[in-house]
Image: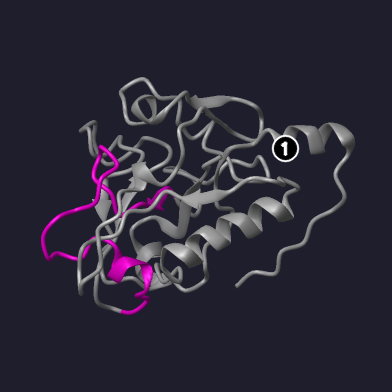
Amino acid sequence: MSVLTFAPLSPAQAQSAQETTFFVTSVGSGKGADLGGLEGADRHCQTLAEAAGIRGKMWRAYLSTQATGGATAVNARDRIGRGPWQNAKGVVIAKDVADLHGANNNLTKQTALTEKGEMVKGRGDQPNQHDILTGSQADGTAFAGSQDMTCGNWTKSGTDGAAMTGHHDRMGLDDSPPAKSWNSSHASRGGCSQDALRGTGGAGLFYCFAAN
């Protein structure tokens, strides 16, 4: 786990930070797709937000879980509140859940910023880190069936399992809808470890939304 450090914010920066309601995590868990389940992922969002000076918000990771081992499936779209959501620069990425999952949302490489207001490396950058963990279908719902698409509901970091990822830069190997999808492009390959995620263009990052 990376050590989080932050410098005091100026009044203007503090005001801007307070208005942030969406970000991509600047760092992952350090354990691949093992995020400590939804609870651990939410806590990671909260910790990063508060370190960046974003206070008084209830953060939720945009992650789905599957109905396995008696667990109830959870849809990412149902976890994140009603919106609207804006990034650290004050740019609105979506006005509500329907807009977020529609064709006209404003989630791009230029707007899908970290909690610090920084861009995440995408296709063409070194290293490419555009694979964002979601475990979700394009409409923000969980996958049915027995195929693991959430790395054991965000508890695996080995060679087994897989996680669905999206491309925050809306770019892939072609112009197909999945290649351009921010939340449902392709599954990880080779397991759920940090190395496996890195191998397909990821770093174990995920989206965080203020749900209040």
- Whether residue 132 appears in magenta in the rendering, the answer is yes
Instruction: Give the residue at the far top of this rendering.
Output: 104
Residue kind at label 1, given as amino acid type: Gln
Residue in front for this viewpoint, 75 or 147: 75
Identify the secondary structure beneath mark 1: helix
Structure colour scheme = one colour
Position of residue 178 relative to residue 61, above or below, is above
Q: Position of residue 43 (x, y in %)?
A: 56, 62
Q: Position of residue 79 (x, y in %)?
A: 41, 47
Residue in front for this viewpoint, 190 or 102: 102
**Magenta highlight range:** 130-158
Query: To which quarter of the image does residue 118 belong?
Result: top right
Position of residue 165 relative to residue 17, above or below, is below
Residue in front for this viewpoint, 59 or 109: 59
Residue at x 30%, y 54% (from the top left corner): 74
- With 8 as the anchor, is 26 left or right in this view? left
The residue pinned by badge 1 equals 18
Query: To which quarter of the image does residue 176 belong?
Result: top left
Residue at x 33%, y 79% (from the top left corner): 158
Position of residue 190 relative to residue 205, above or below, is below
Q: Position of residue 32 (x, y in %)?
A: 43, 69
Residue at x 49%, y 61% (from the top left corner): 41
Q: Position of residue 8 (x, y in %)?
A: 87, 50
